[in-house]
Image (spheres, grey):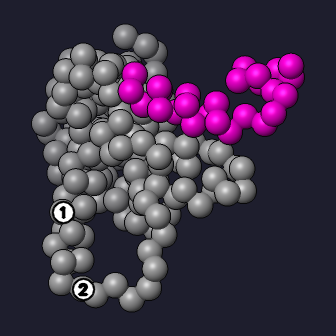
C-alpha cells in the first residue's frame, strides 16, 4: 500500500466518523483528478463542475459503504462513473424531446487538431468511450489496472485489452502528427 493510499484511507475513515476536517482534505486531494476525469469524457467545464458536485454529494451519502480495507480511489471513481452514466441517460432522455438549435461541436473536442495543438483531452477525444474511460482513469486518475477494473466493473484482462487498443490508436495518430524530419521519439533525423 502506498503512502498516499494510506493517507486517503485514513482520511476516509475519519470522514466516516464525522471528523469535520476530513471532507475538506478529501475534496482537495481528489477533486482535481475527478474534474479531469469528467472533462476528458466529453463534459464542458461547467458540466464537469456539476458532475463533480453531484459526485461529492453521492460520496457523502454513501460514505458508510466504504470499507477501510479497500483502496479509496476505485471506490470514488466507481461513484463518479455512475454519476456520469446517470447524467448521460438523463440528458439523452431530455434531448429526445428537444430540437437542436445550432451546430453542435464534434464530440471529444477534436477542434484542436487543425491548429496542431495536442493536449491530453484532445488526444483521448478520438478514442471510443470505453477506451477513453480506461485511459483517463489510468493516466489522469493515476489508478492501477486492478483499481480501474474495480471502478469500471471489468476484469483486469478487459482493462488491459482496452488500454492496449487505445495506446495503439493513439500511437497511430501521433505518428501521423509528427512533423517531417522528426522521429516519433521527438529527435530530429
* Depth order, front residue of 128/149: 128
Q: Would residue 26 be visible to someone looking at this image? A: no
Q: Would residue 162 be visible to someone looking at this image? A: yes
Position of 138 with respect to 154 (left or right) is right
Residue 136, image x, y percentages: 43, 37
Mark seen at residue 102 = none
Quarter location, residue 133: top left
Give the residue drawn at x 24%, y 62%.
Answer: 87
Give the residue drawn at x 57%, y 37%.
Answer: 173
Considering every residue shown, the one lying at the far top of the view is 1
Residue 61, image x, y percentages: 17, 51
For residue 79, above or below residue 103 = above
Question: The residue tagged with tag 2: helix, strand or loop?
Answer: loop
Mark seen at residue 98 = 2
Question: The residue tagged with tag 1: helix, strand or loop?
Answer: helix
Give the residue drawn at x 29%, y 47%.
Answer: 80
* Depth order, front residue of 150/157: 157
Q: CA distance from mark 2 to mark 1?
A: 15 Å
Residue 157, image x, y percentages: 24, 16
For residue 125, above or below residue 135 = below
Quarter location, residue 57: bottom left
Q: Residues within 10 Å of mark 2 (few under 14, many from 20)?
A: few
Quarter location, residue 115: bottom right
Q: Nearer the viewer, mark 2 or mark 1?
A: 2
Position of 91 with respect to 3 (left or right) is left
The residue wearing badge 1 is 89
The magenta stretch spans residue 51: no
Give the residue drawn at x 40%, y 50%.
Answer: 41
Residue interval drawn in magenta: 164-189
Q: Residues within 10 Å of mark 1 (few under 14, many from 20)?
A: few
Amino acid at each position: 500500500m502506498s503512502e498516499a493510499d494510506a493517507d486517503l484511507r485514513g482520511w476516509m475513515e475519519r470522514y466516516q466518523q464525522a471528523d469535520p476536517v476530513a471532507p475538506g482534505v478529501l475534496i482537495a486531494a481528489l477533486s482535481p483528478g475527478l474534474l479531469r476525469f469528467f472533462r476528458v469524457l466529453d463534459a464542458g467545464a461547467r458540466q464537469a463542475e456539476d458532475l463533480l458536485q453531484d459526485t461529492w454529494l453521492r460520496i457523502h451519502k454513501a460514505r458508510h459503504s466504504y470499507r477501510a480495507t479497500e483502496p479509496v480511489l476505485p471506490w470514488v471513481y466507481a461513484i463518479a462513473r455512475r454519476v456520469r452514466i446517470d447524467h448521460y441517460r438523463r440528458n439523452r432522455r431530455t434531448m429526445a424531446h428537444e430540437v437542436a438549435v445550432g451546430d453542435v461541436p464534434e464530440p471529444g473536442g477534436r477542434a484542436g487538431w487543425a491548429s496542431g495543438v495536442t493536449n491530453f483531452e484532445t488526444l483521448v477525444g478520438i478514442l471510443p468511450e470505453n477506451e477513453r474511460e480506461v485511459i483517463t482513469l489510468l493516466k489522469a486518475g493515476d489508478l492501477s489496472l486492478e483499481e480501474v477494473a474495480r471502478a469500471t466493473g471489468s476484469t483486469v484482462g478487459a482493462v488491459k485489452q482496452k488500454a492496449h487498443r487505445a495506446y495503439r490508436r493513439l500511437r497511430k495518430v501521433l505518428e501521423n502528427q509528427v512533423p517531417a524530419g522528426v522521429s516519433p521519439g521527438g529527435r530530429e533525423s
